[in-house]
Amino acid sequence: MTVLHDERGQGSVEAAVVIPVLFLLLLMLLQPGIVLYDRIVMGGAAAEACRLLATSTDAQGSMARSCEAFVRHRLAAIPQHDCFHVHGGNCSWDIQLIGGESSDSVTVRIVNEVRPLPLFDSGAKLMGLTNAAGNLEIEESVTLPTQPSWAASSELGLNPASWIGGWL
């Protein structure tokens, strides 16, 4: 008795099994990549806003509005697509600016909402990671001192006029 082994079509069957698994793995890397991109842009905008706030003499007035406008301009690098940033009828950016030149430190806190991708939305809801609207909330907060450590520890203090006198 002779048994014939025909291997034609084996590659097609293997591809039919492997390709959907590879696409699923690629999709599973996409959502963390989106969240990471958002956090990087938000962190950079918050750090630059801290540097602006540390030099502002009018932390509650026009400088705060200018600083918030600067942050929103930097956050425009994030695409206006729901999987990157839920924009809809009202913007979901929540920007808080705390402190100014006279305080010891300044803090910028940015909160964003992201709609999870189709395979992640049900899992995120089951794990309680979504808010009432079904979106993921991403928060980035940066706190920086208003004066560098070398200036704060200087024997001449934080008064620039005394520094000039100390150099002469």
Image: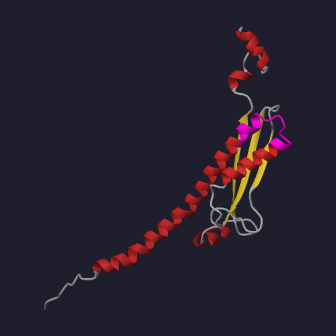
Query: Can you say which quadrant of the picture contains the N terminus?
Result: bottom left
Give yes or no for residue 88 being in the magenta stretch.
no
Outermost residue, bottom side: 1
Q: Report the side of 118 relative to 145 (left or right).
A: left
Where residue 158 sits in the image (x, y, percent)?
78, 21
Q: Residue at x 69, y 51 (%)?
A: 73
Note whether residue 157 is visible: no
Residue in front for this viewpoint, 135 or 83:
83
Relative to 88, residue 60 above or below: above
Q: State which quadrant residue 36 falls in.
A: bottom right
| Up/down of 35 relative to 157, above or below | below
Whether residue 53 is in magenta: the answer is yes
Q: Residue furthest right?
A: 61
Quadrant (top left/top right/bottom left/bottom right) for the C terminus: top right
Quick one: 91 or 13, which is closer to the camera?
91
Q: Residue 119 sits in which quadrant?
A: bottom right
Total residue callouts: 0
- Start and end of the magenta stretch? 49-63
Q: Residue furthest top?
A: 168
Query: Which residue occupies the foreground of this view, 150 or 89?
Result: 89
Q: Residue placed at 81% from the left, 44% from the top? A: 64
In the depicted structure, whether residue 112 falls above or below residue 66: below
Residue 126 appearing in the image: yes
Q: Is residue 20 above or below residue 69?
A: below
Q: Residue at x 76, y 38 (%)?
A: 53
